[in-house]
Image (cartoon, rainbow, N blue to C red):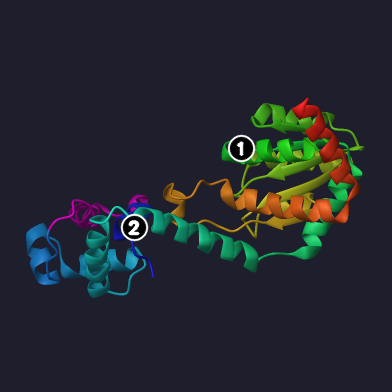
């Protein structure tokens, strides 16, 4: 059950009608909880509108709204619960990531990463932060990794990539016109492509030889409680863990890299 009513309301803010905005503002102002009759008179809106507001944010009725509202008000008085709330969200995200684990896709990722020395990691915004982590890990295993994070460079990278190079595209939403154009170009030129996304129906999937599905963020998590690159980082850590087990010779390269860094 959704526990933080304030985050729940904010996550639906752009979907509200003008009347629903009035109801939302009342609760976000943390005013006294009222019966539906009293709230209807106070805000000069119909009870039907309040009920529709409840449905809009995914609740069954006004009684459930008041229950969560009182719960959230009590939780807000105890700052120690902030840590518990965040760690609970991380645990839920990790659980969802485990539930969609696909060993065959992970192994295909590892195989292709092993086959190629030069890797272009394409990802804009927070997706590029995950790319920086990938670059750090696999550069130490002897790979040359370029992280490309703007639209024009992504297209250029796909246009000039060679068949002996690998492209890893990363898009949590999986909907990006410039990325689609780049991957279509890469596929047409015979360049191997891997994809990481949370969108099961992403139009980018047909261009990839293998796709890793990341966990989707809930509306509450997407408000910023969870860093948006975390679902991707989980998948990349899974790939890295599997890779060093499948290709044990890479561990020696890692040790050599460590020796250079400590000199």
Whether residue 130 can be seen here: yes
Q: Which residue is mark 2?
A: 81
Mark 1 touches mark 2? (CB < 8 Å): no
Tell me what residue is drawn at x 24 percent, y 64 percent: 69
Q: Residues within 10 Å of mark 1 (few under 14, many from 20)?
A: some
Tell me what residue is drawn at x 74 percent, y 64 percent: 102
Where on the picture, by quarter, is residue 155? top right
Instruction: Give above or below for 117 relative to 3.
Output: above
Q: Secondary structure at mark 2?
A: helix
Residue 58: numbered disc = none
Taking the image as shown, residue 213 lies to the left or right of residue 144, namely left
Taking the image as shown, residue 17 lies to the left or right of residue 211, namely left
Among all residues in the image, which is located at the extreme top?
263
Tell me what residue is drawn at x 7 percent, y 60 percent: 42
Instruction: Give above or below for 232 relative to 1.
Output: above
Q: Is residue 223 magenta?
A: no
Tell me the distance, in whole angstroms, between the alpha carbons under discs 1 and 2. Answer: 29 Å
Label whose residue precedes the other's in the sequence (1 or 2): 2
Where on the picture, by quarter, is residue 147? top right
> If the image is split into quadrants, where does the N terminus sit?
bottom left
Residue 129: numbered disc = 1
Tell me what residue is drawn at x 62 percent, y 43 percent: 176
Among all residues in the image, which is located at the extreme front?
263
Q: Nearer the viewer, residue 46 or 95?
A: 95
Magenta residues span: 13-31
Where on the picture, by quarter, is residue 96? bottom right
Helix, strand or loop: magenta stretch: helix
- In the rendered image, residue 152, in percent from the top left (x then y), is placed at 68, 27
Q: Residues within 10 Å of mark 2 (few under 14, many from 20)?
A: few
- In the rendered image, residue 222, in percent from the top left (x then y), is placed at 46, 51
Q: Secondary structure at mark 1?
A: helix
């Amino acid at each position: 059950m959704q526990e933080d009513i304030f985050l729940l309301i904010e996550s639906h803010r752009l979907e509200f009608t003008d009347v629903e905005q009035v109801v939302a503002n009342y609760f976000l102002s943390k005013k006294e909880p009222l019966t539906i009759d009293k709230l209807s008179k106070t805000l000069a809106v119909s009870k039907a509108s309040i009920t529709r507001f409840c449905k809009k944010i995914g609740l069954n009725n006004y009684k459930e709204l008041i229950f969560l509202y009182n719960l959230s008000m009590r939780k807000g008085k105890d700052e120690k619960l902030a840590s518990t709330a965040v760690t609970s969200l991380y645990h839920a995200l990790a659980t969802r990531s485990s539930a969609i684990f696909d060993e065959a896709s992970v192994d295909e990722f590892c195989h292709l990463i092993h086959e190629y020395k030069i890797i272009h990691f394409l990802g804009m915004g927070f997706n590029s932060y995950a790319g920086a982590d990938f670059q750090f890990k696999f550069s130490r295993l002897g790979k040359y990794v370029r992280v490309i994070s703007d639209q024009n460079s992504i297209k250029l990278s796909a246009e000039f990539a060679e068949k002996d190079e690998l492209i890893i595209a990363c898009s949590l939403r999986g909907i990006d016109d410039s990325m689609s154009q780049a991957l279509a170009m890469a596929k047409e030129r015979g360049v191997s492509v891997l994809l990481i996304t949370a969108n099961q129906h992403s139009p980018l999937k047909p261009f990839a030889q293998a796709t890793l599905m990341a966990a989707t963020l809930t509306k509450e998590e997407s408000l910023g409680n969870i860093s948006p690159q975390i679902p991707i980082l989980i998948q990349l850590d899974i790939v890295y863990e599997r890779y060093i087990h499948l290709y044990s010779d890479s561990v020696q390269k890692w040790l050599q890299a460590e020796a250079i860094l400590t000199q």
